[in-house]
Amino acid sequence: MKYEKSCGVIVFEPSQSGADILLICHRYGGHWAFPKGHVEASETETETALRELEEETGAKAQLLDGYREMTTYSPGRGISKDVIFFVGKRTGGTLTAQPSEVRRVEMLPYETALERLTYDADKQLLEKAKSIIFANL
Protein backbone atom coordinates (compact mmCIF):
# COMPACT_ATOMS: atom_id res chain seq x y z
CA MET A 1 0.00 0.00 0.00
CA LYS A 2 1.34 3.41 -0.98
CA TYR A 3 0.80 6.23 1.51
CA GLU A 4 0.26 9.89 0.59
CA LYS A 5 -0.25 12.97 2.76
CA SER A 6 -1.71 16.34 1.83
CA CYS A 7 -2.65 19.42 3.81
CA GLY A 8 -5.22 22.10 3.13
CA VAL A 9 -7.11 24.98 4.64
CA ILE A 10 -10.73 26.03 4.98
CA VAL A 11 -10.53 29.80 4.44
CA PHE A 12 -13.20 32.27 5.52
CA GLU A 13 -13.71 36.03 5.66
CA PRO A 14 -16.43 38.17 7.25
CA SER A 15 -19.24 39.19 4.89
CA GLN A 16 -22.74 40.64 4.94
CA SER A 17 -24.10 37.09 5.09
CA GLY A 18 -21.88 36.27 8.07
CA ALA A 19 -18.95 34.36 6.60
CA ASP A 20 -17.79 33.67 3.06
CA ILE A 21 -15.89 30.45 2.42
CA LEU A 22 -13.19 29.96 -0.23
CA LEU A 23 -13.76 27.04 -2.61
CA ILE A 24 -11.96 25.88 -5.72
CA CYS A 25 -13.31 24.04 -8.73
CA HIS A 26 -10.69 21.54 -9.88
CA ARG A 27 -9.63 21.66 -13.52
CA TYR A 28 -9.78 17.88 -13.81
CA GLY A 29 -13.00 16.34 -12.59
CA GLY A 30 -14.75 19.66 -11.99
CA HIS A 31 -15.37 18.96 -8.30
CA TRP A 32 -15.65 21.75 -5.72
CA ALA A 33 -13.40 21.47 -2.67
CA PHE A 34 -10.96 23.29 -0.40
CA PRO A 35 -7.41 24.05 -1.57
CA LYS A 36 -4.92 21.38 -0.56
CA GLY A 37 -1.77 19.66 -1.77
CA HIS A 38 1.09 17.28 -1.07
CA VAL A 39 3.57 17.89 1.72
CA GLU A 40 7.04 18.68 0.37
CA ALA A 41 10.27 17.36 1.92
CA SER A 42 10.97 19.62 4.90
CA GLU A 43 7.57 21.28 5.29
CA THR A 44 5.31 21.21 8.32
CA GLU A 45 1.60 20.55 7.87
CA THR A 46 0.73 24.22 8.35
CA GLU A 47 3.44 25.38 5.93
CA THR A 48 2.04 23.02 3.30
CA ALA A 49 -1.53 24.22 3.85
CA LEU A 50 -0.58 27.90 3.49
CA ARG A 51 1.70 27.30 0.48
CA GLU A 52 -0.97 25.33 -1.36
CA LEU A 53 -3.58 27.99 -0.56
CA GLU A 54 -1.45 30.71 -2.11
CA GLU A 55 -0.35 28.59 -5.10
CA GLU A 56 -3.86 27.42 -6.00
CA THR A 57 -5.86 30.57 -5.21
CA GLY A 58 -3.60 33.60 -4.66
CA ALA A 59 -5.16 34.04 -1.20
CA LYS A 60 -3.31 34.45 2.09
CA ALA A 61 -4.66 33.48 5.50
CA GLN A 62 -3.86 33.34 9.20
CA LEU A 63 -4.44 29.85 10.59
CA LEU A 64 -6.55 29.61 13.74
CA ASP A 65 -5.85 27.40 16.73
CA GLY A 66 -8.30 24.70 17.68
CA TYR A 67 -9.03 22.99 14.37
CA ARG A 68 -7.04 20.16 12.82
CA GLU A 69 -9.13 17.51 11.11
CA MET A 70 -7.98 14.54 9.07
CA THR A 71 -9.79 12.63 6.37
CA THR A 72 -8.50 9.42 4.80
CA TYR A 73 -9.49 8.04 1.43
CA SER A 74 -8.17 5.99 -1.46
CA PRO A 75 -7.53 8.06 -4.62
CA GLY A 76 -6.53 4.91 -6.51
CA ARG A 77 -5.93 1.21 -6.15
CA GLY A 78 -3.34 0.45 -3.48
CA ILE A 79 -3.12 4.08 -2.31
CA SER A 80 -4.14 5.46 1.08
CA LYS A 81 -4.20 9.24 1.41
CA ASP A 82 -4.47 11.29 4.60
CA VAL A 83 -5.53 14.92 4.21
CA ILE A 84 -5.09 17.29 7.14
CA PHE A 85 -7.23 20.44 7.18
CA PHE A 86 -6.90 23.66 9.16
CA VAL A 87 -9.10 26.76 9.36
CA GLY A 88 -7.77 30.16 8.33
CA LYS A 89 -9.06 33.71 8.24
CA ARG A 90 -8.28 35.41 4.93
CA THR A 91 -5.73 38.19 5.30
CA GLY A 92 -5.28 39.24 1.67
CA GLY A 93 -4.05 38.20 -1.73
CA THR A 94 -5.84 38.53 -5.05
CA LEU A 95 -7.96 35.50 -5.95
CA THR A 96 -6.40 33.90 -9.03
CA ALA A 97 -6.91 30.30 -10.12
CA GLN A 98 -3.72 28.28 -10.67
CA PRO A 99 -4.24 27.43 -14.37
CA SER A 100 -2.64 23.97 -14.24
CA GLU A 101 -4.93 22.66 -11.46
CA VAL A 102 -7.82 25.02 -10.74
CA ARG A 103 -10.70 26.06 -12.99
CA ARG A 104 -12.31 28.62 -10.63
CA VAL A 105 -11.84 30.20 -7.21
CA GLU A 106 -14.83 31.66 -5.38
CA MET A 107 -15.70 33.15 -2.00
CA LEU A 108 -19.23 31.95 -1.24
CA PRO A 109 -21.64 32.49 1.67
CA TYR A 110 -21.35 29.66 4.21
CA GLU A 111 -24.63 27.93 3.27
CA THR A 112 -23.92 28.22 -0.48
CA ALA A 113 -20.44 26.77 0.03
CA LEU A 114 -21.91 23.89 2.03
CA GLU A 115 -24.25 23.10 -0.87
CA ARG A 116 -21.57 23.58 -3.56
CA LEU A 117 -18.99 21.20 -2.06
CA THR A 118 -18.97 18.00 -4.11
CA TYR A 119 -17.98 15.47 -1.47
CA ASP A 120 -19.77 14.67 1.80
CA ALA A 121 -16.43 14.44 3.64
CA ASP A 122 -15.73 18.09 2.75
CA LYS A 123 -19.23 19.11 3.84
CA GLN A 124 -18.60 17.43 7.19
CA LEU A 125 -15.27 19.28 7.55
CA LEU A 126 -17.01 22.61 6.96
CA GLU A 127 -19.78 21.78 9.43
CA LYS A 128 -17.14 20.90 12.06
CA ALA A 129 -15.41 24.24 11.36
CA LYS A 130 -18.60 26.33 11.63
CA SER A 131 -18.27 27.24 15.31
CA ILE A 132 -14.62 28.35 15.05
CA ILE A 133 -15.38 30.33 11.87
CA PHE A 134 -18.34 32.23 13.32
CA ALA A 135 -16.49 32.83 16.62
CA ASN A 136 -13.69 34.60 14.70
CA LEU A 137 -15.53 36.94 12.32
Image (cartoon, helix red, strand yellow):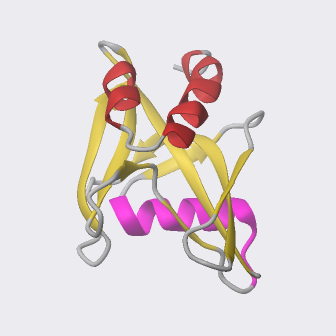
Q: Which residue sits at x=72%, y=63%?
A: 45
Q: Does 98 appear above or below 107?
A: below
Q: Which residue sits at x=41%, y=28%?
A: 114
- Please name the predominant secondary structure of the magenta segment in the image: helix
Q: How many marks?
A: 0
Residue 50 is a magenta residue = yes
Residue 34 is situated, as x and y percent measured from the top left of the image, at 46, 49
Question: Left or right: 98 with respect to 37?
Answer: left
In the foreground, 21 or 122: 122
Q: Which residue sits at x=32%, y=72%?
A: 101
Residue 21 is situated, as x and y percent measured from the top left of the image, at 40, 34
Question: Left or right: 128 with respect to 32?
Answer: right
Q: Does 22 appear above or below 24?
A: above
The answer to whether residue 97 shows anywhere in this view is no
Residue 33 is a magenta residue = no
Q: Which residues are magenta?
A: 42-57
Question: Left or right: 101 with respect to 37?
Answer: left
Farthest residue in the bottom direction?
41
Residue 44 is situated, as x and y percent measured from the top left of the image, at 75, 69
In the foreground, 98 or 126: 126
Q: Does 38 appear above or below 59?
A: below
Q: Which residue sits at x=65%, y=23%?
A: 132
